Amino acid sequence: MFGNRGRESPDRRVRRTRRAIRQALVDLILIKGYEAVTVTDLINRADVGRSTFYAHFADKEEVLFSSLDELAELLRLVPAARSGPLLSFSLPLFEHLHEQRRLARALLGRRGGAVVRLRGEQIMAAVVRAELMAALPSEIPPPASLNMTVTCVTGAFMALMRRWADGELVATPAEMDEAFRAVVIPGLDAILITHRGSL
């Protein structure tokens, strides 16, 4: 009866272990870059056994993807069908990354590596596509240029975030959002007006 009082629940232990491994990845990316990080590095930094690591993750890429899930979840909180402004995820995401600067620098900065950038771009492109599809008339097929438009918007946002995460740009989240929207929204509005006019 008394022995159970101080015990940590299995769910809490799992969360704590996974959090420690993810934090170890962030720390190591900032020290040596993602490409140079090994599973052994993660095990040593997180102070877990090898079998414990593999009970939670298959490899370092899976640790990375689980770390990016937090950002993906934040983006998914913005409903695809809404009456608010187009690309309304941008300010909340800039604010979140400002609060989580170390995470942003590790996952979005130059030390993150190609795998990190590609995954981030895939997540962002899916959100941008969903927003544009929701803003387009459902009665007609999407424009042939949709893929190019998604690529342009995603590229602009990711480049801005990357330079901000690395400290090359100094601005508040609101200033970052204003700059992004000032460049991107007029072009998107023009595309949407043209497409709606084809009804």
Image (cartoon, helix red, strand yellow):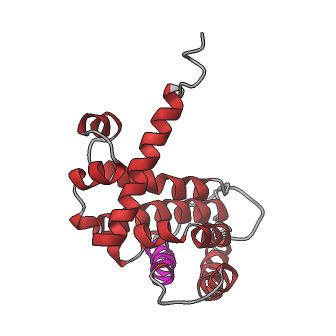
Identity of the residue drawn at 48% across and 73% down: 154
Q: Is residue 127 magenta?
A: no
Q: Quadrant of the C terminus?
A: bottom right
Q: Position of residue 97 (x, y in %)?
A: 57, 69
Identity of the residue drawn at 51% across and 30% down: 11
Can residue 143 be seen here? The reply is yes
Please tell me which residue lies in front, 19 or 85: 19
Please tell me which residue lies in front, 178 or 64: 64
Identity of the residue drawn at 57% across and 59% down: 130
Q: Position of residue 79 (x, y in %)?
A: 67, 54
Please tell me which residue lies in front, 176 or 139: 176
Quarter-of-image position of residue 148: bottom left
Q: Which residues are magenta?
A: 148-164
Please tell me which residue lies in front, 199 or 74: 74
Q: Position of residue 56 (x, y in %)?
A: 35, 37
Q: Main secondary structure of the magenta part?
A: helix
Q: Quadrant of the N terminus?
A: top right
